[in-house]
Amino acid sequence: MTDLRATERRNPRTADIDLASSHDIAQLINNEDQLVATAVATQLDHIARAITIAELSFRANGRLFYVGAGTSGRLGVLDASECPPTFGTDPNMVQGIIAGGLPALTRAQEGAEDDRDAGAAVMDEHDVGVNDFVIGIAASGTTPYVRAALMRAHARGAKTAMVACSAISDDAASVIDVPIVVLVGPEVVTGSTRMKAGTATKLVLNMITTGAMIRLGKTYGNLMVDLRATNVKLTDRSERIVMEVCGVSRDDARMLLDASDRSVKTAIVMSLLGVSCEEAERRLAEQGGVIRRVVPHAPPPVADV
């Protein structure tokens, strides 16, 4: 019997891939990968809704949870773990939950994705509530752990979404506020959803968190101004951003950052408006953390590349 899930169907374009040369294998995979961005583009309206819900949740001191199993769960944990170094967020603000817990990040936990009770219980354990936003990730759209988590999150009053690469059933859709269904078609290797489905999922998650963070004022133009200089690379980036935006030397940039408790955003406002750290922070707080609402200047133009 043919599986109705798109992610489980056989791909006629790769039926003879086991006879292909190394170059032809790479070409076949690349050909399929090029279909992913087009499929994601069909869901931009839904992704935009998810960005807005995430922003509103954050402004209400709520949290964003990704819930998934296997590759889907790992991608959620990855996206969540990148938010603190990229945007200076509290680690609790965006959280990734994977069926089977932390051991599942590096080794498959057999049966964890089928544990409905665990999926529901994890929402209770995190005290999910009305200000939170829970995004289930399930390439097939049918993962029991994920669906149970979404049902419990919905019952607890949270907003919900699902990122899937197969059609979502009517009963699952009934508890999902935002369905994001990216139909990338059958995989190069049948059922290997770490491939096109995984790529599509990564693109969607990037858009949701990055979009929400931009709306929160975590960027100035396209400059990353809410990062925290926790290593040499980020320290250098912080200094370069302040130098570029404020037109100051590296030494002056360092002094501004020292005076602003290493906050790039605060340092920029201090320099451009000639105010103290406390005044810069006050003005930013009044304007929801968005530099563009505080400083009349536009970021410096981008040089041709």
Image (spheres, grey):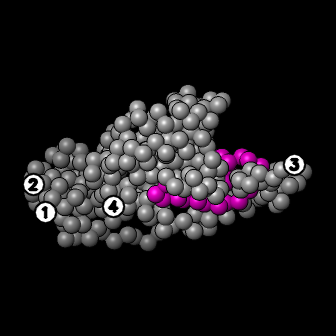
Q: Write the start and end of the magenta stretch as one range.
A: 176-196
Mark 3, residue position: 18
Circle nearer the N terminus (3, 4): 3
User: Does the magenta run of residues contain 180?
Assistant: yes
Residue 4 coordinates in the image, percent (x, y): 74, 54
Whether the residues at callouts 2 and 1 have beta carbons within 8 Å, the answer is yes
- Tell whether 112 sits left or right of 15: left
Which callout, 2 or 1, points to the residue nearer the camera? 2
* Residue that badge 1 annotates: 273
Tell me which residue sits at (56%, 36%) in the image.
Answer: 116
Taking the spot 77% from the left edge, 59% from the top edge, the residue there is 27
Q: CA distance from mark 2 to mark 1?
A: 10 Å
Q: CA distance from mark 3 to mark 4?
A: 47 Å
- Is disc 3 placed on a helix, strand or loop? helix
Task: Say which of marks 4 and 2 sits in front.
Answer: 4
Alpha carbon separation for disc pair 4 and 2 = 22 Å
Q: Which residue corresponds to mark 4?
A: 215
Are dots 1 and 3 in contact, CB under 8 Å?
Answer: no
Q: Mark 1 belongs to which amino acid?
A: Leu
**Type of the residue with mark 3:** Asp
Residue at 15 percent of width and 52 percent of height:
281
Q: Are marks 3 and 2 in contact (CB under 8 Å)?
A: no
- Tag 1 secondary structure: helix
- The amino acid type, in three-letter code, at marker 2 is Glu
Q: Is residue 261 left or right of residue 81?
A: left
Vertical order, 80 against 24 (above or below):
above
Task: Indicate the amino acid at tag 4.
Answer: Arg
Q: Which mark is residue 279?
A: 2
